[in-house]
Image (tube, coloured by chain):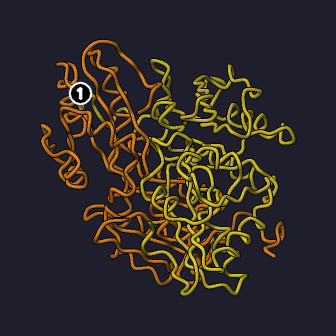
Chain colours: A yellow, B orange
């Protein structure tokens, strides 16, 4: 439990928890405690299914996809009526997820429920583990979703990250409608870092249908990528060894391994 | 457990696990399982102290600070002799931590122990939770340690991240010897985003001596910051509300809260 999070007095509790990447082996105890203490669980079906055995017997409210503001308001309505509500998102609610919207919606409401946010294992943590050790040095995280952000801003960030040799972590890389952005990004990277730049992708990390690929830009097939996939692009020093994607923690001439 | 990590055949097992931010409420079950299954635990005293109650009765090897390559070799020596060794780092071993060095050292050795890396809750996840919701949009993570990376590279990355309006997460922000870099960085940010840019810092997240500050660049006191602190600098849209640091998930004109 996030002890220092906003107590807004009165009424119920709204706990914002993430499932982690999927397997309950990566669900933090603080999140499990909030799920078990809650009266009502609110979330998308996909995320609820990941924690289904842990919430047996609870009141469950399944939300429709995309209706995020409605979902948060619904969760607050229940909390303001005195319930302990757990709002469940994937990964870590603090990384591109529900924590911010909960605080934003709280500002717009007159309610007084306590808000608790619990950090978790985000997609970037889990996917880095599956790929090897790509995040040993500076990295930039970019979402390719242009629903709420103009593409010009996204492309500017990609160019800045690539030119400054950041490892680049790509959230929301590709969907049926969002089908050209990832390719554009890879072309920008290839131009700066070369076609042998290392690329890793993980789909559904820690779940039964997990898929892991470590390859180079020239070998990479964007059609393997969907909305459940995270893509990580190496920096100029990232290499592949024994199938793992490794970014050295500094410049080789600065340290000795033996 | 990271099921798909390198099995290098034979001998023992080297499990690379993080403590998470500190409180055992944030230690993932997969890491706990590895600690409990291990014969020998290797790590710095600071990190071992965080998991001390969980490793009672185990053989414990306390390492000196800074001797990271020696520590990893020592852990491999024990694993190659048939033991199950847990090498403990802080946070998530996959983010600026031990995972990469373990793979790098493995390449340089003839051993055949199995390597298991377990993702965890990194400082950036935990500190984001404590501050509010600063990581709802694109962010760049930069370490100010110039032990292994030239300062020119670090400064170039900071400038690129600031110019492209990334939220900036600062690892290793300040130590007794590293005493001017953070100030230099804040001056770069102030020049681009103004003195009212939001800055958050968290020291020792989730531990008894936790310290959380949400303020602006002009009010920020760099002498509050030490090596146990993570600093997060907001983007141009980040604001403070009820003591929390909030980065909106997109551009306000793109969505409605009511």
With respect to residue A205, does B7 lie above or below?
above
Q: Is residue B221 left or right of residue B42?
A: right
Location of residue A60 in the rendering, given as x and y in whole percent from the top left corner: 67, 58
Name the residue nearer the viewer: A120 or A29: A29
Name the residue nearer the viewer: A34 or B132: A34
Residue receiving disc 1: B84
Residue lying farthest to the right in this orientation: A177
With respect to residue B151, does A111 lie above or below?
below
Location of residue A190 in the rendering, given as x and y in whole percent from the top left corner: 69, 31
- Label 1's element? strand
With respect to residue B146, does B253 lie above or below?
below
Quarter of the image with the N terminus of chain B is: top left
Q: Is residue B148 left or right of residue B12?
A: right
Name the residue nearer the viewer: A204 or A43: A43
Q: Residue at x 85, y 37 (%)?
A: A176
Location of residue B108 in the rendering, given as x and y in whole percent from the top left corner: 30, 20
Quarter of the image with the C terminus of chain B is: bottom right
Q: Residue at x 72, y 26 (%)?
A: A224
Q: How many marks?
A: 1
Location of residue A253 in the rendering, given as x and y in whole percent from the top left corner: 34, 33
Q: Chain of mark 1?
A: B
Rendering quarter of residue A75: bottom right
Residue lying farthest to the front in this orientation: A57
Q: Residue at x 27, y 42 (%)?
A: B88
> How busy is the neighbourhood of tag 1: few (under 14 within 10 Å), some, or many (20 plus)?
many
């Amino acid at each position: 439990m996030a002890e220092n999070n906003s107590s807004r007095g009165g009424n119920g509790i709204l706990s914002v928890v993430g499932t982690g990447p999927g397997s309950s082996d990566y669900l933090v105890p603080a999140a499990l405690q909030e799920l078990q203490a809650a009266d009502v669980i609110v979330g998308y079906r996909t995320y609820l299914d990941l924690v289904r055995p842990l919430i047996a017997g609870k009141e469950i409210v399944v939300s429709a996809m995309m209706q995020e503001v409605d979902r948060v308001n619904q969760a607050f309505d229940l909390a303001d009526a005195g319930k302990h509500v757990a709002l469940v998102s994937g990964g870590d609610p603090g990384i591109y997820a529900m924590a911010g919207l909960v605080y934003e919606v709280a500002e717009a409401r007159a309610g007084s429920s306590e808000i608790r946010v619990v950090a978790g294992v985000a997609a970037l943590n889990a996917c880095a583990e599956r790929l090897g050790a790509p995040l040993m040095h500076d990295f930039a995280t970019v979402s390719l979703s242009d629903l709420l952000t103009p593409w010009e801003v996204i492309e500017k960030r990609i160019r800045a990250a690539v030119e400054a040799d950041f490892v680049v972590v790509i959230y929301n890389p590709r969907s049926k409608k969002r089908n050209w952005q990832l390719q554009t990004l890879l072309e920008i990277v290839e131009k700066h870092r070369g076609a042998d730049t290392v690329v890793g992708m993980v789909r559904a990390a820690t779940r039964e249908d997990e898929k892991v690929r470590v390859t180079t830009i020239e070998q990479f097939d964007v059609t393997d990528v969907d909305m459940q996939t995270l893509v990580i692009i190496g920096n100029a020093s990232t290499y592949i060894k024994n199938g793992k994607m490794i970014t050295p923690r500094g410049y080789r001439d600065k340290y000795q391994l033996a």
